[in-house]
Image: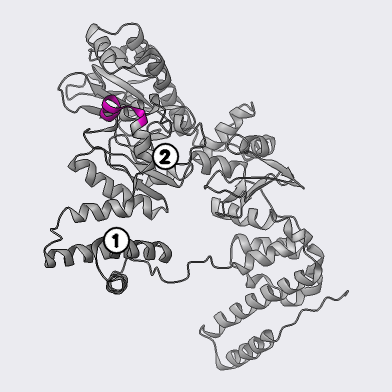
Amino acid sequence: MYFAEDFIEKVRTQSDIISIISEYTNLVQKGRSYIGRCPFHNEKTPSFSVSEEQQMYHCFGCGVGGNVITFMMEKENLSFMETIEELATKANIPLEYDNNKKYNNREVLLKKDIIFELYKKAARFYYYNLTRNAPDYVKEYLKNRELTEQTIRLFGLGFSPNSYTALYKYLSKEDVTDEILIESGLCIRALNGKIYDRFINRLMFPIISPTKKVVAFGGRVFGDEKPKYLNSAENPIFHKSNTLYGLNLAKNANHDYYILVEGYMDVVAMHINGFTNTVASLGTAFTDGQAKLLKRYTKDIVILYDNDNAGQKATLKAIKILKDNDFSVKVLELKNAKDPDEFLTNFGSHKLKNMLLNAKSDVWYQISKIQNLYNLNNLPEKVKFLEQTAEIIANLSSSIEQQLYIDEISLRFTIDKKAIESEIKKKIINTKDNKIVYENHSKKVDLEVNLLSVLYHNPNLYNEISQYLFPELFTKGIKQNIAINLFNKESIDTKNYYSIEEQKIISSIIINENMQNIEFPVVYKMIKQFTKGLNLSYYKKLIYSDINPEKFNNLIKRKFETQKLNIIPKNG
């Protein structure tokens, strides 16, 4: 732990959750809560509630919830310690470290702070060299690529001089060791033991985190040198698989969808042409970590990769990762241009805007790629095509979506719908990794959370049903702890020391003001239903465990009595 517990609690209590969340979504006061559209998923009807009194939030649509620390961790994809730093800065609270050696990782934290500072100074160094000391061939390149002063300033572009030690000499004045410069990835040690700059004679693209910190660089050569693009090495503040270029700018507006491209210049070109919802995956393959990062801001993606074989393969891989993370995905294939940058130069933003409106669904993109492999006038090849197409449809999680595609495929390729449906069912049965898409996907009702929520908002009811409740009914951990608190008439601890999943449970119990307004006959009906369900589940689990015959018979009797359970209000 880097910070003292008292300091963490000070940051939590002095951070205004209403003010912070209002930076991401519009909140309107309704009763004792604030209501708005959830900043974690797209929705038309507000289902996101924030309690100023409890300093907690919960979305009844997607289930996210917690306190102000949880919110910043989830929304900005920050670590716990990074979140505390960010909130402390917002609240103008000086950082206080924990001097207890048992918990102290201060050296690690200070090292990260040093590297952050080095990258900030390196960005300024590169920017100065581009805007004040750029040689003629660099100025000519900027002119040809239409990179204006405004664009350079917006993206913080820079130039690494054609010198092996320019940055090293500059940063060495900052009283830092060679070891930290090498660990930062800004410099490298050669086999001869000498230290050189990692980036030499390149156009520099600062990679900036959602919290507006420079964490890495991408450098593009001006000639034919290889590699064309070079990224910073991974270091304590930079992990490629969890970073997206341009996200720091794209997140500034609540876009309905994001556009995913491959390269730095694609992002720059898209942004200056008005497509400010564009991000890139640093020239590497799109990763699960990047998908999870994107999920903080949108659930809808249009993939706009380069129109070559590598780009098409990368698109198919990205589709799978995005679909596995529950994104809605479309794909736009560019014609007569190798990438978005070239397309915008040749055809302009208006045409691209119209094409984006008509982007293919990920399903039709995959089907079109398979179709290109076969001659559909040849019967055996058409069979292979339809078999592979059926596999794509089998992987869809919605039976409604499946049926719509079945109808279109049947019409477009002249094949009986029943034959397609039969093939899809075979694919589901024969593929271990496939989900059974014809099953009911409705969320499982959490009896424990529902009962705890009723008791939290109606604390006087516990005395009337205490004979039916005991801690073992609840799952060990946060649910059982909350149950014990409520049974003992103690408040629920809402501090930050719980995991994100635990915070979701706490928030769903606390932020449920509807429970306070339900008429008592309905409350008792709910209490009876939830208590009976938990008791039956508990006894059923014990009956199937390894117990002696006498105890088994006793449990059967108690289970039978529970089935007839009837809770009658003692006072009414």
Label 1: which residue?
392
Q: In this view, does 224 lie above or below 30?
A: above
Horizontal arrangement in the rendering, residue 487 relative to residue 221 (left or right): right
Decide: few, some or many residues near mark 1? Use Cα within 10 Å; few <14, some 14-19, many ≥20. Answer: some
Residue nearer the viewer, 49 or 410: 410
x then y, percent, for residue 105: 49, 36
Among the two numbered marks 1 and 2 on one chain, the one whose residue lies closer to the N terminus = 2
- Amino acid at circle 2: Tyr
Q: Do the residues labelled 1 and 2 touch (CB within 8 Å)?
A: no
Look at the numbered disc 2 and give the secondary structure of its residue. strand
The residue carrying pointer 2 sits among few (fewer than 14), some (14 to 19) or many (20 or more) residues within 10 Å by Cα, namely: many
Please name the residue that numbered disc 2 is placed on.
258
Is the residue 110 above or below the residue 451 in the image?
A: above
> What segment is highlighted magenta in the picture?
342-350
Looking at the image, residue 375 sits to the left or right of residue 411; the answer is: left
x%, y% of residue 224?
14, 22
Instruction: List x then y, in percent, for residue 11.
Output: 64, 35
Mark 1 and mark 2: Cα distance apart in space: 24 Å
Tag 1: amino acid: Ile
Q: Nearer the viewer, residue 339 or 415?
A: 415
